[in-house]
Image (tube, rainbow, N blue to C red):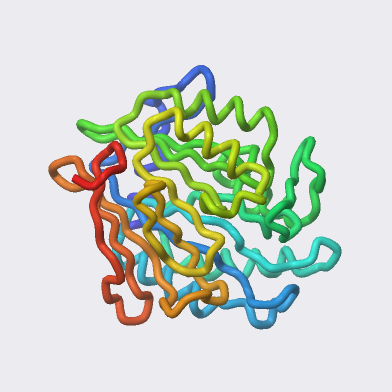
Amino acid sequence: MRRLLLLALAACRSPDVKVDAAVDAPVTQLTDLRFAVVGDTRPANIDDTANYPSDIVRQIWTDVEAEAPPFAVTTGDYMFASTTGSEVGPQLDLYLNARMAYSGMVYPAMGNHECTGYTASNCGPGGKDGSPPNYQLFLSKLIFPLGETKPYYAERFSGPDWTAKFVFIAGNAWGDDQALWLERVLSEPTTYTFAVRHEPHYSNTAPGVDPSTQILAKHPLTLLITGHTHSYSHVPAYREIIVGNGGAPLTSSQNYGYVIVARQPDGTLQSTSYDYMSHAIVEQFSVTPGGIAP
């Protein structure tokens, strides 16, 4: 049944597709808005592929599959591998194999480990760190299969009485082209706007954090979805949830887990964070399309 849903989602992208001339992207039709968020996934030590957290990742995606959202977003860091070694491909393959426990669509954000591993790193055309294997294989294995060509992109959805855009910001592949693109795509009017970026607001040594935050401040925002910190937290002042507890070594007493965001009949969004083992609710809150408490 879920496989049929995936085919239906793909079919909705053509032929009755709405295209924005500035960014040339289709709109996926959905009955309602419901999606999962999964955070950082990597081993504790560099090039330690033997201890990649596959079992944890697989269980998280198994839990997400049971929740049955039509799609999920992920917040970056799918590897911890040196740019000069041979572990990037094997680690990404382990991640993708574990992710197969979920049959829906997955839209990934780029993390600093998809560049050189340093928070301040900047990859891609014009970036000071160039295009190491971490960056190239992230694109080829996770981004190109979506039909995208860059580490920053947008996905659009609509329902009977709502529209939504998900804007994936690559804070470690930042440059003028991305800044101009971000300004354009955020200018598109939608009921809900979600920005997905690896680094949270306070990790501003990443090249794209402060510039993208400044651009986001000029436009409507429902929710900023980030990771990088290996825990879960909600930061209402920034309309932000930090979801970094997807398998990377934890930095708080919270367990590994995931988040489900679901549109409610009154148009608000309910965000629920779950413990991946007990399935207990860690936190639940609601926001309006404008990102504030109802």
- Say which of 142 and 235 sits in front: 235
Q: Is residue 116 left or right of residue 261?
A: right
Q: Residue 140: x, y in percent?
A: 68, 49
Q: Residue 8: x, y in percent?
A: 35, 43
Q: Quadrant of residue 114?
A: bottom right
Residue at 81% from the left image edge and 61% from the top image edge:
83
Residue at 67% from the left image edge and 69% from the top image edge:
91
In the displayed structure, 266 sits above or below 133; it is above
Q: Residue 41: x, y in percent?
A: 56, 67
In the displayed structure, 168 sits above or below 162; it is below
In the displayed orientation, state which residue is furthest to the left.
266
- Say which of 12 and 34 sits in front: 34
Residue at 46% from the left image edge and 42% from the top image edge:
195
Q: Could one spot residue 4 in this view of the protein?
A: no
Quarter of the figure with the N terminus: bottom left
- Say which of 294 and 195 sits in front: 294
Residue at 74% from the left image edge and 67% from the top image edge:
81
In the displayed orientation, state which residue is furthest to the top.
21
Quarter of the figure with the C terminus: top left
- Say which of 245 and 143 sits in front: 245
Q: Could one spot residue 210 in this view of the protein?
A: yes
In the displayed structure, 49 sits above or below 76; it is below
Q: Is residue 260 left or right of residue 242?
A: left
In the displayed orientation, state which residue is furthest to the right.
84
